[in-house]
Amino acid sequence: MLPGKICAACNREFTWRRKWREVWSEVRYCSTRCRRNASNARAAARHSIKDQN
């Protein structure tokens, strides 16, 4: 059985891929789409905090 993790963006389980063998400890997202969406959400949160001040 391959090791798995939970995606930080969509909370789905994903499994190890050969292309991640060198950086598996750093992998947080199941896909480029989730990584991009998480990045956009963080940026939007930063901007909304700045707008409130």
Image (cartoon, rainbow, N blue to C red):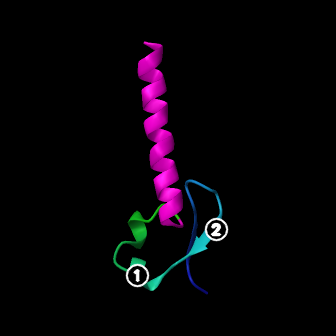
Q: Is residue 39 magenta?
A: yes
Q: Residue at 44%, 85% (x, y): give it.
A: 18
- Residue labelled with disc 2: 13
* In the rendered image, the vertical position of residue 5 relative to residue 1, given as above or below: above
> In the rendered image, which quarter is residue 46 located in?
top left
Q: Is residue 17 left or right of residue 5?
A: left
Q: Which residues are magenta?
A: 30-53
Tag count: 2
Residue 5 x %, y %: 57, 67
- Residue labelled with disc 1: 19
Q: Is residue 51 magenta?
A: yes
Disc 1 versus disc 2: distance between alpha carbons? 17 Å
> In the rendered image, which quarter is residue 25 located in?
bottom left
Residue 32 x %, y %: 47, 64
Q: Disc 2 marks which amino acid?
A: Glu
* In the rendered image, the vertical position of residue 17 relative to residue 52, given as above or below: below
Residue 29 vs residue 37, the one in the foreground: 37
Q: Secondary structure at mark 2?
A: strand
Q: Residue furthest left?
A: 22
Residue 10 x %, y %: 62, 56
Q: Disc 1 marks which amino acid?
A: Lys
> In the rendered image, which quarter is residue 13 located in?
bottom right
Q: Residues within 10 Å of mark 1 (few under 14, many from 20)?
A: few
Q: Could you tell me which quadrant the N terminus lies in?
A: bottom right
User: Considering only order in the chain, which callout, 2 or 1, is on the residue closer to the N terminus?
Assistant: 2
Residue 17 vs residue 38, the one in the foreground: 38
